[in-house]
Amino acid sequence: MKTTVALASVIGIVASAVLADTTAPDDVSFTEYGEVEASLSGTAGDPAKGAEIMTTRSKGNCVACHAVTALADAPFHGEVGPTLDDVGGYRSEAELRGIVANAKKMFDGTVMPAFYKTSGFIRPGDGYTGKAAPDDLPPILSAQEVEDVVAFLMTLQDS
């Protein structure tokens, strides 16, 4: 019994520490030019998970709008946004984090969705029901998923 209580306490402390390092969507600090300099999760991103998020329709689905040669195996690359080849070579990590979190902070009027935003929407809808959302919407990506996408984008250099 004491072991179970001790283990539960340790798990609680670790979970609290992890959550304490995560920046809430409304607390993200953007620079004047839209960069986000600090990690949103406090944990380094995983490029492999980032690539998966970029090609998963229920998550980022970045390839729906952007061509990415490194993800050529994913079907239906879009042409709405710029190609992301070599984006890690000409954009900083802070710029990429800001763009993924909320591209409108850097590019006013862009059609790119804000992947880490929960408020400030104009009449957000609830799925395909046509009704207004009952509560604040959750972000499309978690803080760690944003970091994973940024880590993958940083690998796209000299392609």
Image: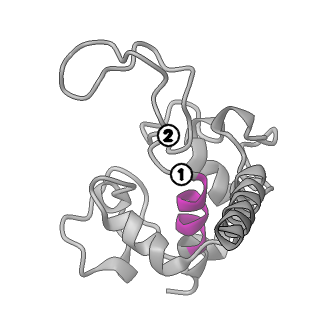
Q: Is residue 29 visible?
A: yes
Residue 142: which disc? 1
In the image, residue 149 lies in the stretch drawn in magenta: yes
Q: Residue at x 56, y 24 (%)?
A: 119
Q: Residue at x 33, y 50 (%)?
A: 80
Question: Which residue, given by chain and number where applicable, does mark 2 sit on?
Answer: 139
Residue type at mark 1: give it: Ser
For residue 66, side relative to residue 157 (left or right): left
Tell me where residue 85 appears, x and y as whole percent. Answer: 47, 74
62 or 142: nearer the eye?
142
Seen in the picture, residue 154 relative to 123 is either above or below; the reply is below
Callout 2: helix, strand or loop? Answer: loop
Q: Which residues are magenta?
A: 143-151
Seen in the picture, residue 1 relative to 28 is either above or below; the reply is below
Secondary structure, magenta segment, majority class: helix
Residue type at mark 2: give it: Pro
Q: Residue at x 32, y 62 (%)?
A: 63
